[in-house]
Amino acid sequence: MYVAVKGGERAIENAHRLLANARRGDQSVADITLDQISEQLGLAVDRVMSEGSLYDRELAALAIKQARGDLIEAIFLVRAFRATLPRFGASEPVDTGAMRVQRRVSSTFKDIPGGQILGPTFDYTHRLLDPSLAEGFVPEAPATAEASTAPTPRVTDILGRDGLIEPSPQAEDGAGVGDLTREPLNFPANRDLRLQNLARGDEGFLLAMGYSTQRGYGRNHPFAGEIRFGEVEVEFAAEDVGFAVPLGSIELTECQMVNQFKGSATEAPCFTRGYGLAFGQSERKTMSMALVDRALRARELGEEAIAPAQDEEFVMSHSDNVQATGFVEHLKLPHYVDFQSELGLLRKLRKEFAEANAPDAMKEAAE
Amino acid sequence: MVTQHNNQQAQRQAAMAVLAHAEAGEIAARLRNFALPPHQDLRAPENGLVMLRGRVGGDGAPFNLGEATVSRAAVRLASGEVGFGYTLGRDGEKARLIALCDALVQSRDFGGLVERDVIAPLREQLMIRRKQAAEETAATKVDFYTMVRGEG
């Protein structure tokens, strides 16, 4: 147990002053701007927005700067900030089928309507460090080609037409949308809450959980049916305006995992699905999320739930890095009172042990 | 009457869809092209959050993905039209300018003018930016060939 302590104000103040200097580093080196972070460390910004659960590039860049590049600390700062603003309401659900795709690949079909589009990707790079980036490298202008106006339907929609894949579950009439920022989490949790939890969950945790399913702990034979990244429009049904107001666009990554079949005596076998969606270009995150989403459907699909990734209470209770870091890191705060009582107990036990194991002679003498 | 109402709503939405993608400075610069009618803030710019929703599988039941910052404002023209401005981000001035444009779009005297001098040129800029991005993306379209194992 943590018991509040007093004192040390001056030392704390000076420590924060020292932190401000350590954050700034060598002052003969130029101060980094938020634009530079947003433009040149864009994927860090995307991660902070996703796990901070707040879409605002500028705030995420500020948080990264303030946290000295510690992304979990930055996520913590963003989460704290969101608590300071009122909520106007919820958007209309975004339509990822209408995304202006900047990247879209499928590992299941090579010929998909709208085509495979690599976009800006690390895939197929050689992972060799590039020294030219240390010396003011200016990239060649991007190549261009005639843009197609053909639609880019989701691969799962194409599979769905033939009934080869299960349809997405539709909302039940009058069912609200669960919000774990408003109501405490109870188990079992519905898919809406699970997806909200995973969407803001730690990328590293989800990566490890997803990986564990591939290695056999809750195997579900995944294929990356589709990964797409791009811009979607956001609309908000504002009560005062009386219609759905366009708010602008956000960048999203979506992953549709296609998994091995289910079927029964009455239902023809079909592929099952896992879903991932996150702010920005967050491929590793959405792929991991989709693997874990599918694993967490074990109960619903009548699978034996024996692996950690299939245990929704385990996954959902440990996915949030702000909660996790809070509990782990609180261990470094003063626990003097608590520790004193442990110490007292230990001394007593040791004394009893010493007495019990004392040489017989001493025991006899004592008797 | 209903059609007229729907037309105006569609027009306002179309204008907002363009304005939300512009910078406050760009909107302000375009609005300087004509003399603005008297107007006042009905609601001062205010920042808040909107919970962004996705759908399970992209097309299923909605779920809460995460929030976004949103700024909003309302402006009334002296002639009575009330305009609303909503935009992603925390730029209150931009929300106010969108609200002003929304009020002007509804005005008999200024509707045509604001479409011609503000919305249309901003829409054209937006389309140019999107076309450029689409062409850069299109250059990365790939054809994968499946090879028989042992080949290549």
Image (cartoon, coloured by chain):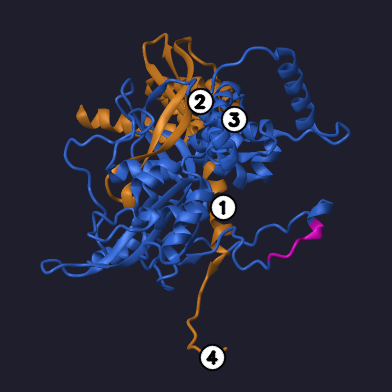
Chain colours: A blue, B orange
Is residue A262 toward the left or the right of residue A53 in the image? left
Same-chain check, marks 1 and 4? yes
Indicate which label's residue lies in the foreground, 4 or 2: 2
Q: At 26% across and 54% down in the image, what residue appears?
A: A168
Q: Which residue is mark 2?
A: A1
Mark 2 belongs to which subunit? A
| Label 3 Cα neighbours within 10 Å, binned few <14 / some 14-19 / many ≥20 | few
Whether the magenta-drawn stretch holds residue A128 is answered as yes
Prevailing secondary structure class for the magenta stretch in the rendered image: loop
Q: Which residue is mark 1?
A: B133
Are the residues at dot 2 and dot 1 in contact (C-beta closer than 8 Å)?
no
Residue A224 in the image: state x and y as whole percent: 42, 64
Mark 4 belongs to which subunit? B
Indicate which label's residue lies in the foreground, 3 or 4: 4
Q: Is residue A122 above or below residue B123?
A: below
Q: Which residue is mark 4?
A: B151
Mark 3 belongs to which subunit? B
> Which element is circle 4 on?
loop
Q: What span is in magenta?
A: A127-132
Give the alpha-carbon distance from disc 3 to disc 4, as whole Å.
57 Å
Q: Which residue is mark 3?
A: B26
